[in-house]
Image: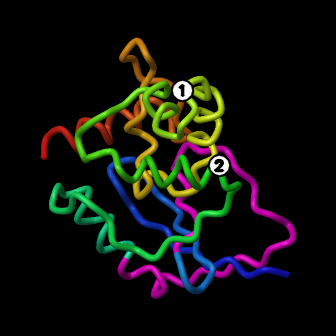
Amino acid sequence: MDTIWYAELNSPLGKLTLECDGEALTRIRLPKEKWQADPESNRVRKPELFAEAAAQLGAYFRGERKEFDLKLNPRGTDFQKKVWDLLREIPLGQTITYGELAAKTGNPKASRAVGAANGKNPLPIVIPCHRVIGSNGKLTGFAGGLEAKKTLLKLEKND
């Protein structure tokens, strides 16, 4: 049985649940995200493992941090990881479309696959999937809801 260590962190979005594997941050669960705990895992609350992540997220929410420097271990396919790496290249306060992101993967026709990978991002905020918008410039899909996406983008624009 895998052990998942977790801690909760208050944020402008509501209560975030941070998870790690003991070495690296593996997931950030947003307040409105729908999920169920894996019955095959042992969940243990251990806030002390998250001191650095909590400090960096707090600084980000206060507008004092533009980038994160955390050890991450997002679990996904090679394609998903490629998309997530590209997401980390989007500068704070900027957005790109799913089509633009697909082009960066080397396959400009893969905007739906990019959207699916974006939706599976286990580390929102730190891997900034909220910076991807529809081709019409409108906000689309976000696990935490569109209000949370709007809040994050507004917070970053006020930098």
Q: Residue at x 65, y 36 (%)?
A: 116
Q: Quadrant of residue 131?
A: top left
Q: Please tell me which of labels 1 and 2 falls first in the chain.
A: 2
Judging by the rendered image, the residue that carries numbered circle 1 is: 108
Say what secondary structure mark 1 lies in.
loop
Residue 142 at x, y = what percent? 52, 35
**Relative side of 100 to 58, left or right:** right
Residue 106 counted in the magenta span: no
What are the residue bounds of the magenta stretch? 25-52
- On the image, the x and y values in percent for residue 36 come to 75, 54
Closest to the observer, 93 or 3: 93
How far across and down, in percent of the image, does residue 144 sit?
51, 41
In the rendered image, the vertical position of residue 153 relative to residue 37, given as above or below: above
In this rendered view, identify the residue nearer to me: 17 or 71.
71
Disc number at residue 125?
none
In this view, the residue in front, 111 or 105, is: 105
CA–CA distance in space, label 1 to label 2: 14 Å
As helix, strand or loop, the secondary structure at mark 2 comes to: helix
Residue at the far front in the pictured view: 106
Mark 1 crowd level (few <14, some 14–19, many ≥20, 10 Å Cα) = some
Q: Is residue 52 above or below residue 131?
A: below
Q: Residue at 25% across / 47% down in the picture?
A: 92
The three-letter code of the residue at mark 1 reads: Pro
Residue located at (30% from left, 74% from top): 55
Amino acid at the residue labelled 2: Phe
What residue is pinned by disc 2? 79
Instruction: Indicate whether 77 appears above or below 26.
Output: above
